[in-house]
Amino acid sequence: MPILWLILLVLALGLIGFVLGRSRALSNAGGDIRQLHSLPSYYGSNVLLATLIPGLAVLLLWLIAQPMVIHGQISSMIPESAYTDAGSLNLVMSDVKRVAEGLDIAVQEGALSVEQARDIRTEFTDIRARLGEVGVALGSNVEAYVLKAAQRYRVMNAVGHWIMTGAVLAAALAGFAYALMRTNKDYRARNQVEKVLLGLLIGAASLAVLTTVGIVLSLIFNTIEFFKLYPAMDFFFGTTWSPSFGGGSELGILPLFWGTFYVSLIALVVAVPIGLFAAVYLSEYAGPKVRAIAKPLLEVLAGIPTIVYGLFALLTVGPLLMNVFGEDGGLGWMQGGRSVMTAGLVMGVMLIPFVSSLSDDIINAVPQAMRDGSLGLGATKSETVKQVVLPAALPGIVGAILLAASRAIGETMIVVLGAGAAARLSMNPFEAMTTVTTRIVSQLTGDADFASAEALVAFALGMTLFVITLGLNILALVIVRKYREQYD
Amino acid sequence: MNDMRIVKRDVDMNDTKISAKGVQVFYGDTHAIKDVDVEIKDKTVTAFIGPSGCGKSTFLRCLNRMNDTIDICRVEGNILLDGEDIYDKRVDPVQLRAKVGMVFQRPNPFPKSIYDNIAYGPRIHGLAKNKADLDEIVEKALRRGAIWDEVKDRLDAPGTGLSGGQQQRLCIARAVATEPEVLLMDEPCSALDPIATLQVEELIDELRENFSVVIVTHSMQQAARVSQKTAFFHLGNLVEYGDTEQIFTNPQDERTESYITGRIG
Amino acid sequence: MSDFTADNSPAAGKGSSLFKETARTKRRNAAEARFKAYGIGAIALGLFFLIALLSAIISNGIPAFKQTFVTISVELPEAKLDKNGNRDPAEMAKVTTFGYKPVITNALIAALKAEGIEIPFAKEKDVADILSSSAPAQVRDTVLANPDLVGQTVDFRLLASSRVDGYFKGRVTREALARDKNLDAEHLDIADQMVKAGLMETTFNADFIFGADASESRPEQAGIGVSMVGSFFMMLVVLSLALPIGVAASIYLEEFAPQNKWTDLIEVNISNLAAVPSIVFGILGLAVFIQFAHLPQSAPLVGGLVLTLMTLPTIIISTRASLKAVPPSIRDAALGIGASKMQSVFHHVLPLAMPGILTGTIIGLAQALGETAPLLLIGMIGYIASNMPDGIASGFLDPNSAMPAQIYEWAKRADPAYYERAWGGIIILLLFLMTMNIIAVILRRRFERRW
């Protein structure tokens, strides 16, 4: 693995730099550590960092850039007649890569010489058979342009690799030499090292921004692609969802919205009263012992992965509801175990600790003086809670419910397993419906062509989901923050 | 039996309102109040004074069982309100607190309108027949709280928007609105500026006409200004209890004298 | 509650006795009792759900750890398995599992006859449906690994078919088999007799914990071991990236960040990322790591990267809390004797905050371990995790599954025998999560300082 070797080489260079930098500073000070501006190890670290950072930065940039450059170069070599749309260009490109890998393996195994691998022509050799001999199976015969592109790909890769090695080592050595040259006893090594460290810290902190940018960009670009293929108005206001990879899909988001909304509504109807009453009981009534047991037990519900809830919905709650509301129960409202009710109930259970611990915090933030004032007037505890504590905590509780709603809307596994796959606009909670998140999963898994509207729609759905949950979160945070300021 | 007592009270307005005998209070293992006997008169302002941590607030909170809200607190002995033991099993603390109202150290208006703050007590206790009746009660309470003129134009404004002194008078008006028989005040002026303090003190003096007022204060001057009776607490003991004038001019106990003259406290 | 009461009995008019509870107080106390009961009811309901969930997991999942095995002596005839008789594994490999099937069937029939168990089928070889279809492969692998066994009679412990297994676990009934073309009720009679004769037993199944996934038709063979390894490699990625990056980011934000727009932007981003639905991280992973950076699909490396981004906000939030808990006096003391800001942070504040940081990291890891949705989008389902990775690079880069993704995959398969596997997988997953959380709690208890 040559890149690993390269990294090790740069690391080794850095270590040498550390030792040299340290001893150079010491000898410059005549071996007297008191003459140095900084501790000796800082001089070493300075050279170490000056070696590693340029070297590894060049390596990283190169590794990101090279495939893109080569990809662009190679795809321009493929004749336009070979592909009719962008989707099959990707297929051709993956063929090219497979052939190139095959040639690599053939050379390694000695089935082809290096020159042969570079120069063979489809006109003279049956490439498929030759590669088959070394265990590289190709789906079809190799077209001439594919082979040519593959050979070019190999050459570019090899050349790129050598230049990269050179560039990385050059950058590392330059940093090494520069830092070592500047090392003398008056050099402010500590300040320099700390400046670099601070830069690294800032970089780490900025990763959060980068992640958001990455999310937004990957959603936006693909969403724009989608809207080129499918009109935005039909997407946002269409009432039919029936994707078909053969074409002629109808991709209206409204049935998905309705399913998402309905499931979340049931979840909140379950979670909010239970969570709120539990929080009130825990913070206003329960003794320390009950609190110490009940609170962590409730929070266990929050630590259980959503896949477990999904399975619970699919295999336990669904059949249970079927027994009551299905054909067997005599009511006949339910056709199958998967339904809005199944997913909603289980999601509600998942959200109970979420609502209760957020509300608990918020209720505890209401000053004791409020309660004393009310009790001192002769109010009962429940009157105090209902008429003083809860109204005072209301903004915070609304914020908590908004956060819970955002969780419900973005939840995936429970609805994937429990809600079903049928997109419909119906009022019956015992019918199977589908949600935004389940459709994202189903459109992006499987062997879909990523350039088709049917796959790209998932990004538009993701974008919508992202915007809605982000909006809810920001709103909730603003409300909660306002509320906290009131009592701080 | 009850009827007889009521008649008697009606005749003798200056009778004992609250009588405490052998009261002990424990916070967990801490013995906070040691064997306190005291008789609190009706239509009188009684001041509890003493150095901080002496138990005067704790004792005050026993008088309307506010200590019940603290899990580790335990009260022994008898406290009689009009001859009835308030720690009797049959007594509902909610009903007791309607008779013995309380005003706290820091003004604590509810985050509701001024009107709703005052109306809260009458509403939970069902004192008003209808809306007009309630309006009347609120106005009366605000007048008694000496704050009516300042807020009559903005009864719908939130109570939390008032100034500190106004808030405290609002809280007093809120306590008065439930028509209590005794009003407990736990250092009601400690969070207020001197002008607001003066207004509240004047108010306390007026309240004496209708209620028995018990006030805890850390300020001896305040006790001297507003009270007719004074009790001096020290380390959980009731050291001395008597007419205010007598306590401040001619204390019987050495410790009281030291405190009055500023040697302890 | 209405403001004005019809009977209008004031609570405590002047002079009324405290000992007499008024009608109004009675009503108010009843309301109080009701309200309190609602609270207790809510808690009880929450705990009931927890118990229901856990008992569903345990009762459905425990059977996955047991499996029905058939122990029979199999004669390995040279004529069929090694025609040339030179015991060359390469040549013997030309005999496929189809060649081994009759050998095993004959052995089973012989064993049954030896015990005097009657075979009520028109075609005697139908009795072989009792065995898992993995049995020939198992025998073949053993023979190829040790060619000298050919010609001998060897004892084999073979998997029973999942339906026979389900029969002993109560999942499969004779009535249900009427509609099943894979197995007949007569098979179950034979199975019952085999148990009596000691040829068949249901015992602990280590292969479920350590084994690999199997194809859809062989649930009896499926295990969670390989996806466990996949999860392990993902956690390695998460730990080695999220911990240093998270700590570095928290140190910057808590100790060095100036009050400016950029800092605000970072803070807002972190709190919002913590609430972004996990599926959106999956979309990010698909678009950036797979489509843009051309990293391999289904690789634990990619899964780890996505989970790292998802876990970072959690780790940053908890790390900042524990840095904040270190009192400023410690920083002042270090700065006061001439340490640089960086030295005071790295020499004094960070070590003191370490227990809190580790606790937060473990909880973040536990969260990442149980996360499923983003893994679906980067191709960690639909893949049958049948091979253990060979070596570290392969562990990171070769397609694999992860525990929650494996559970999801099993839940999707139609055979109820796989549902049992899914529940069993959940038990293992929850055991890991429980262990991690307990470690976190112990760390917190042990090292938590109160300043």
Image: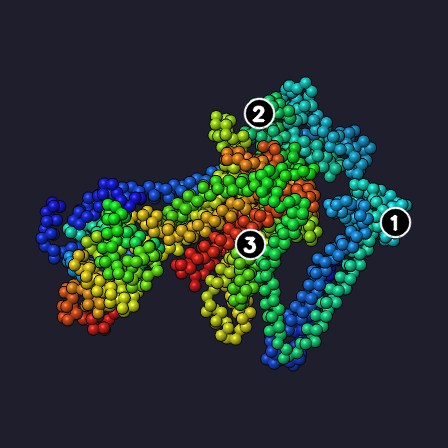
Q: Residues within 10 Å of mark 2 (few under 14, many from 20)?
A: few
Disc 3 or disc 2, which is closer to the eye? 3
Instruction: Answer with left or right where residue A152 lies relative to residue A209.
Output: right
Query: What is the x, y in percent for residue C346?
Result: 55, 67
Task: Give the numbered dot on residue A120.
Answer: 1
Query: What is the x, y in percent for residue B212?
Result: 18, 57
Q: Earlier in the sequence, mark 3 or mark 2?
A: 2
Please say if C63 is above or below A103: above
Q: CA distance from mark 3 to mark 1?
A: 52 Å
Q: Are marks 3 and 1 on the same chain?
A: no
Front residue of this view, candidates A307 and C13: C13
Tell me where residue C173 sits by quadrant: top right
Instruction: Answer with left or right where residue C345 lies relative to residue B105.
Output: right
Query: What is the x, y in percent for residue B221?
Result: 21, 69
Please say if C39 is above or below A207: above
> Dots 3 and 1: beta carbons under 8 Å?
no
Circle 1 — which element? loop
